[in-house]
Amino acid sequence: MLAVEEARNRVLEAIRPVDEVEVVPTAEAAGRYLAESPRARVGSPAFDNSAMDGYALRAADLGEAGGELPVAFTVAAGDDPRALPEGTCARIMTGAALPAGADAVVMQEKVEADEGRARFAEGPSPGANIRLAGEDIAPGAGLAGPGERVSPALISALATAGIGAVRVARRPRVLVLSTGSELRDPGEPVGPGEIYDSNRFALLAMLRQLGVEAVDGGRVPDQMEALRGALEQAAEHDMVLTSGGVSVGEFDHVKAVLGEKGEIGFWKVAIKPGKPFAFGRLGRAYFFGMPGNPVSALITYQQFVRPALIHWMGGRPAPVRINAVAGAGYQREKAGRTEFLRARLEWSGGQLAAIPLSRQGSGMIWGMSRAHAYIVVDAGSHGFRTGEAVVVEPGSEWCSFGEPQSRGEE
Ligand code: AMP
Ligand code: MG
């Protein structure tokens, strides 16, 4: 069996990042992966300006004890002010350009003003309340690099620097298929022995959140011919994701059909839940065969497919892990697999507590929907006791991390 990191590395090594780029408006670039280092067209601030509503002056015109100055003019945001005559001050608003000659701003709350004169109780030091040109972004500065995911904060920085469009990697087209003769869609009647498909919808939702082009390929019954037909569509996609049919059951045909039509790497990964996992090529598409159990499908997506997609788009996937204290203990008899225990996170007594949920079965998807994170139990570990330090991987796409939800369990 392959260790989780080993399996992930094999996937990443096998995938060649896309070299096709697109130019998209900055306003629409959220979630895209940069294929360039955008450079600032203008600095930020673009000019020296006031950080406060107040009065601009020369610090040298007032002693430490303050004094009184005539108000020469008013500068609003957007004005292009003339130079400040010596021995005067100017009324100035937040964000307005500092008049030449001025070197400090006094906030209006500290000034008494009437009939064109302003009285200052104390003199400011030079530079007070002034935002200097380029102190955040120097003109021409590289703001981010290739392989970075464009965040809303970066969109704001790019816009600030006058960058209207960026070069990004093309988004992959990803086909999602569910396999299983027992599956029906919600809304349809189910007969004896049949169940509702759920994996397809969770996978499509996670793909859309990541910002890739997700294509619903529907359901395929456990028949070789049906599977062959469904996989014909793979040619028009960059990646194909299936769930179900990859273990050793009599009707688990994914491996066989993939063997006929493409190249298959079928692995048992030392992961719990989610042991059987197929990875390969189907024409030009990369193929991921995930297990059918809903929790296993989501976890293998998170551990292998998501990093693969990010890598394909030129990004550098890195799992986020944080330390927490176990809010309840967990023991297992058999070590050997890295286990991803679904847990709730709670901030209590100045500590982050991770509480493993009681519904840990690989089919218990509702239990997973009440969780915020995985507690990562190392392959060699037999578990942990209440109060022990644990390593936690907060959920990103599969849960609503940080949103209150009913506990459900109690
Ligand atoms: P399999 O990997 O095909 O052996 O499926 C393992 C378990 O997951 C079985 O109980 C299946 O019925 C169930 N399962 C497979 N595919 C899905 C799906 N798309 N949605 C919900 N459950 C599924
Ligand atoms: Mg099946």
Image (spheres, rainbow, N blue to C red):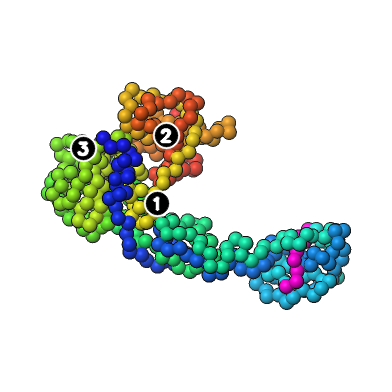
Q: Quadrant of the N terminus?
A: top left
Task: Answer left or right for 132 relative to 379.
Answer: right
Q: CA distance from mark 2 to mark 1?
A: 23 Å
Residue where numbered disc 1 is placed: 316
Residue drawn at (44%, 66%) of the image:
166
Measuring from the top left, give residue 288's x and y in whole percent.
26, 47
Say which amino acid is labelled 1: Arg
Q: Quadrant location of ligand 1?
A: top left
Is residue 41 in view? yes
Measuring from the top left, give residue 263's x and y in whole percent.
18, 49
Say which amino acid is labelled 2: Ile
Residue drawn at (82%, 60%) of the image:
123
Residue where numbered disc 2 is placed: 375
Q: Residues within 10 Å of mark 1 (few under 14, many from 20)?
A: some
Sequence-wise, the earlier of marks 3 and 2 is: 3
Residue where numbered disc 3 is placed: 247
Closer to viewer: mark 1 or mark 3: 1
Q: Quadrant of residue 64?
A: bottom right
Residue drawn at (87%, 63%) of the image:
67
Q: Quadrant of the C terminus?
A: top left
Mark 3 close to ligand 1, CB under 8 Å: yes
- Judging from the image, what secondary structure is the residue with disc 1 in? loop
Sequence-wise, the earlier of marks 1 and 3 is: 3
Q: Image height check: is 187 above or below 67?
A: above
Is residue 52 in view? no
- Of 302 and 323, which appears nearest the observer? 323
- Judging from the image, what secondary structure is the residue with disc 3 in? loop
